[in-house]
Image: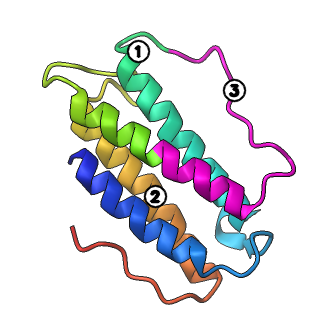
């Protein structure tokens, strides 16, 4: 997987979020609301970029926390940025680079895959729980 795969997944996610009328709408499958899902995915992508750049060292000295007043529009901007940052880190990484993850070391393709999974699976839950038609990218 590559940065372009992340960008395609991110574009599909943004398209779905643009159709959500209420960011506070519940997503029972995940025990949060739409903004909470967007914030979770954003934090995952941000961490994945940092993890790959940090290499084999566990970089966990900070917490990533959404501002309480940040709504869906705000979080979508942050998500778009996090998607692009991870995409660029993945694209720039060398073939031998590895990054720390709780489940083991991963290369750039692995972090791209984890990022796509976060984007597509959790936002698929939003589509399902909010009864929105949505088809993820075919690749």
Across and down, in percent, residue 28 comes to 72, 72
Toward the left, the furthest residue is 95
Q: Residue at x 31, y 62 (%)?
A: 8
Is 73 covered by the magenta stretch?
yes
Q: Which residue is mark 1?
A: 54
- In the picture, measured across the screen, residue 91 lies left or right of residue 50, that is left
Mark 3 or mark 1: which comes first in sequence?
Answer: 1
Residue 102 colored in magenta in the image: no
Could you tell me which quadrant the C terminus lies in? Answer: bottom left
Residue at image position (60%, 48%) is 78
Res 102 visible: no
Label 2 environment density (alpha carbons within 10 Å; few <14, some 14–19, many ≥20):
many
The range drawn in magenta is: 59-82
**Label 3 vs label 1: CA separation?**
16 Å
Q: CA distance from mark 2 to mark 1?
A: 22 Å
SS at mark 1 in the image: helix
Q: Which mark is residue 119?
A: 2
Q: Would residue 108 appear left or right of 43 to someone viewing this image?
A: left
Q: Is residue 17 above or below residue 8?
A: below
Residue 58: where, in percent of width, then height?
A: 48, 14
Give how far across and how far down residue 63 sits, in percent.
69, 26
Q: CA distance from mark 2 to mark 3?
A: 20 Å
């Amino acid at each position: 997987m590559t940065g372009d795969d992340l960008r395609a997944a991110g574009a599909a996610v943004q398209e779905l979020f643009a159709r959500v009328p209420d960011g506070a709408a519940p997503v029972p499958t995940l025990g949060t609301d739409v903004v909470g899902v967007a914030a979770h995915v954003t934090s995952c992508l941000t961490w994945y970029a940092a993890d790959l750049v940090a290499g084999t060292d566990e970089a966990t000295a900070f917490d990533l926390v959404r501002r309480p007043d940040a709504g869906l529009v705000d979080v979508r901007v942050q998500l778009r940025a996090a998607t692009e940052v991870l995409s660029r880190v993945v694209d720039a990484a060398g073939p031998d680079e590895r990054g720390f993850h709780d489940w083991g070391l991963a290369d750039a393709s692995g972090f791209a895959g984890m990022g796509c999974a976060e984007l597509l699976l959790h936002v698929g839950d939003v589509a399902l729980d909010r009864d929105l038609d949505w088809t993820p990218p075919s690749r």
